[in-house]
Image (cartoon, helix red, strand yellow):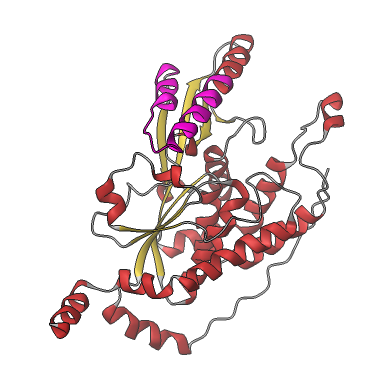
Amino acid sequence: MPIIDEYELPSRKSDPGSKFGEVLQGIWLEDEICFAIAGGGCKAFYGLGFGHELKSWGLKLRQVSGVSAGAAMVLSLVCETEEESVSFFERIVRKNPRNFYFTNLFRGEKAFPHEDMYRRTIRFGMDFEKIIRSGVKVFIHTIKAFPKDDANKNTFRLARLIAETGKAFLEDERDRNKGLYTERTFRVLRNWNMKEVLFTEADFRNPSVIEQIIMNSSSIPPIVSFQNHGKEYYLDGGLTNNLLLETFPPNAKIIGIHYEPTTIVGKDPRLLDRCFLVTPSKQLPITSFDYTNAKGVRETYEMGKSDALKNKEKIMEYLKKDWVKKAEKLRKN
């Protein structure tokens, strides 16, 4: 199993000279934005890098949404620990030689190292007080499963649920890749009496609760175990909506990060038309659950920053206030 180092957060220095530029920018630009990052395991570091670059331009994240690993990333942006969190995760990934430890099965231990590494990174980058003080509105999407039953019966139901949900999700993904809209996963959820749940900053009572909410949205057995609170189980929110755009105000400027075209299949075209959506400019150098590729983690994060810069002109055009766009149109005429 990996050896996990502790790592001190370096001090962050602010640039007072940038404040004046931000004020001027706010006159012609909608600099308070809504920002969404899709789930995708390690792929979500791309969204973290993209968001970090947006913030460096003076843009303010007033509302954020995240699903699965995307939830951890948007909160890292709110905490302003993105650079430190990437470095910390790189360090523990570098010390993890495998994604599956077969011998652990015989010792009754977890065969997948992902959950422990993920939790430690969340705890490292979490600043509960900063999240609360920020005033940022947060939305985290997950799925609440059935109540607990008798232990033996419950174990059997969990196995069936994993099998049925996984099969439906893979078949839906196959059809979404063809541009088709499907509802197999939704039907499975209805059959199991499950429902979608939205956590917000109002639920953030302390760091442990925030951590658990992120884990609830990231539950992908057996890599990340079923999460439970009291008598309720939770599953990965990406099973039904991997890019949460629907919660933002109708007139807001929304920037959304996802990784595959299938993510937005079936969404309201009118909603998509008023968002600025981004996918990576080329194939990401890491897969979702490769927790051995430290180089890929860093490159994915840096690609997010680079793609934001490449899109800066388009993003600034999208964020222009209506009166500015009207003035420019009149001047051209």
Q: Position of residue 268 (x, y in %)?
A: 28, 44
- Does the magenta stretch mainly form a helix, a strand or a loop? helix
Q: Position of residue 199 (x, y in %)?
A: 43, 43
Q: Is residue 231 visible?
A: no
Q: Position of residue 98 (x, y in %)?
A: 81, 43
Quarter that holds the N terminus:
top right
> Which one is nearer the viewer's eye here, 87 or 243?
243
On whether residue 175 falls in the magenta region, the answer is yes
Question: Above or below — where is 253 with respect to 159?
Answer: below
* Left or right of 121 on screen, residue 178: left
Query: Residue at the spot x=77%, y=59% of the render?
Result: 91
Q: Residue furthest front?
A: 178
Quarter that holds the C terminus:
bottom left
Question: Above or below — where is 295 with respect to 196?
Answer: below
* Left or right of 95 on screen, residue 320: left
The magenta region covers: 163-192
